Amino acid sequence: MATILDCTLRDGSYEINFSFTANDTRIICGELEEAGVELIEVGHGVGLGATERTLQKAIQSDEEYMIAAKEALRKAKWGMFCIPGIATIDDIDLAAKHNMGFIRVGTDVNKVESSLPFIRRAKEHGMMVAANYMKSYATSPTEFAKLVKMSQSFGVDLVYIVDSAGGMLFKDIEKLFLTIREFTDIPIGFHGHNNLGLANANSLLAAEIGIEYLDASLQGLGRSAGNAITESLVLALLKSGMKCNIDYMKLIQLAQVYIRPLIKKSGYRAVDYIAGFADFHSSYIPHVQKVSSKYQINPLVLMIEMSKIDKVDVTLDKLEKVARYLEKNKNLYIGSYELSSYVGGEQDNH
């Protein structure tokens, strides 16, 4: 049996410019709990402290989201995301004041050491703690398993394979899972994005091999091409014969009434497909826009070539180096396009 963690109110906030209100949080949390969802993630998409410490401001403060979730829920646990360097230890203390039930400490796979003080403080407060390895595809299965052992020594309760760019194939997930299992029996979760249309399929197959926690959002609302879709994933789990104690009719109604009206885009953007294909995180798209325009090169090719060099730490300097190479070797690709051709004129702010 897999446990669904619904992240509509957190990851979904990217797609509506972080504009979920405290009242939205209160209502949707209550409806998710009534449908049988046990774990509900709320707050700013980037996590604790993001409104104060980034340019991406949410419509409400972290504390206002905390209060709304606490007021709405009686049985389900609510939690927030935490990226060390954006979040502080004080943010965890504030969340504990409002009885937050779980926290997910997210780091790139090359920065896991930075999670230690956050994990330990959250455990001191009695929270369930997950280590989320962002850009899980950027390391080998053996090295990934070592990271899991490190996080386990820090005190986490579970770990997450995170397909941040939405390009992992099931065989990649299975290999990570099996390698982890050679070292430890710690519970494992999977967070998928849908850039190659595989989020639901990967989540279902993950559950079938024994991954215990699955992230999903109503209508798939989420960063870039979105996430696994809570309501259809529940139906797929049930149809496959797995136990899932969620009222899918209530879930479908909730998605139709509250989330579907928020979805403005139609179809998929070329930039999202290529992000999945190249394992290129969508947060770097603004850099791609700037560099591809400066050098008049195809931004999709820039993404692909950059990912061959570095999938984790993409900087303007690195992109410019790749762009200069492409500018001198235009026979490697066809055309010269502005990024807006691929994102529908929008600036991707993920």
Image (cartoon, helix red, strand yellow):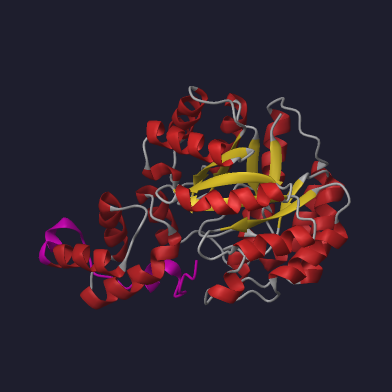
In the foreground, 129 or 278: 129
Q: Position of residue 68 (x, y in %)?
A: 81, 65
Q: Position of residue 288 (x, y in %)?
A: 33, 68
User: How many numbered markers are drawn?
Assistant: 0
Residue 178 is left or right of residue 262, and the answer is left
Residue 280 is left or right of residue 33, and the answer is left
**What's the residue at 56%, 42% (across, down)?**
154
**What's the residue at 65%, 64% (across, down)?**
91
Q: Position of residue 237 (x, y in %)?
A: 69, 33
Q: Main secondary structure of the magenta part?
A: loop
Query: Which of the image's four quarters has the N terminus?
Result: top right
**What's the residue at 41%, 60% (across, down)?**
270
In the foreground, 176 or 194: 176
**What's the residue at 72%, 25% (across, down)?**
241
Q: Position of residue 168 (x, y in %)?
A: 44, 41
Asked whether residue 259 appears in the rendered view, the answer is no
In the image, residue 333 sits, relative to residue 116, either above or below, namely: below
The quarter holding residue 46 reads bottom right
In the image, residue 239 sits, relative to residue 260, either above or below, namely: above
* Boundaries of the magenta span: 328-350
Asked whether residue 266 appears in the rendered view, the answer is yes
The quarter holding residue 282 reads bottom left
Task: Tell me if residue 343 is in the magenta stretch.
Answer: yes
Task: Tell me if residue 35 is in the magenta stretch.
Answer: no
